[in-house]
Amino acid sequence: MNREVVRKRNKLYSSIRKYFCDRDFIQVETAILQLSPGLDRYTRPMAVVLNQPLNDISLQRYLHTSPEFAMKRILINGEKKIFQICKAFRDRENSKIHHPEFSMLEWYSINSDYKVLGYEVKELIGLSAEELKVNELSFDGRIIPVTSSWTEISISDAFKRFAEFDIFDTIDHPLNPSTKYIKPKAHKIGLNFHPSDNWEDIYHKLMIEIIEPKIAELGLVIVYDYPVCLGSTAKKINDKVCERLEVYIAGLEVANGCSELLGTDENLSNFETNQKFNEKIFQEIIPIDISLVKEIKELPECAGIALGLDRLLMLFTGAKNIKEVIYSQVNLEA
């Protein structure tokens, strides 16, 4: 990582702090070590063993995959608008846009929803680009003027437009759809998949191979209203649709947010579902923070979003690989 990138990161962080402080957000800092690191599907945490100084007791904890749980506790305790810039950690992530240690911006506000988050993302990126004197955002050979108009499209319309079927027509169970309807539709448009792939495996292959390349052509894009089974902690609009959004720039996903799911029972059910899902993949049970589950009944109406700062810096600098904008002495190659 060269000196120019170091200075641009500094200016980016300064512009982010100014944006939020000017809007009465409070910057917070939460512990990286957690009992439960996050329970998003396909996300594998890094375990850490803590040894007690005066006995032989060892405790297993995790580096957080996101500060979500800790930040929600701050909302429960009375803060209304908060943001955090921090490191996050996810195992088995190493590609031109993935790194096991990365920088994240996350913010939450009460009496907000995913539509407000979409507006804030657009405003924040525009103002940060202006502060860094960046006129174009570039990735993977695509160059997008910062002043381009944003396209906002539902995931349903994206599939109908680019895959010629509605993804919701493939869902026979809102939380755990079978492959009965998605396999023939995927096969019809020429997608290759393994016979053992589940619904979500095929969905992600459709996104990567069919939908996202078309989204990339649109430049600045917000995709919203996802299936409940992909909603994680997103508030439900109905039994099928939840209030979640993802932000893409030049085909690169940079942010993911939602109106937050409220209620102890629904959150516990969601955590247990994701825990079992990841156990099948990783052969490991990631713990649920039961104390958080009990506290979450006090969580007010709110919305929150996570934005990948390294990916945004890639767009601002034209970097081709995330390692160009991250200072790391860890060799990730075998």
Image: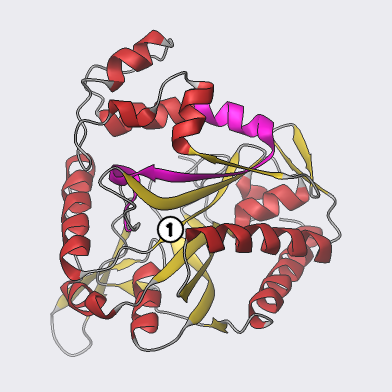
Residue 281 visible? The answer is yes
In the rendered image, the quadrant that contains the C terminus is top left
Is 183 magenta? The answer is no
Q: Give the magenta part as a residue range.
A: 211-233
Q: Quadrant of residue 89?
A: bottom left
In the rendered image, the quadrant that contains the N terminus is bottom right
Task: Name the residue beneath numbered marker 1.
Answer: 258
Q: Position of residue 83 (x, y in %)?
A: 53, 75
Name the secondary structure under disc 1: strand
Locate residue 26 relative to residue 68 in the image: left or right: right
Q: Nearer the viewer, residue 75 or 322?
A: 75
Q: Nearer the viewer, residue 322 or 253?
A: 253
Residue at x 22%, y 63% (from the top left corner): 267
In the displayed structure, 236 sits above or below 206; it is below
In the displayed structure, 120 sits above or below 224; it is below
Residue at x 31%, y 61% (from the top left corner): 38
In the displayed structure, 166 sits above or below 293; it is above
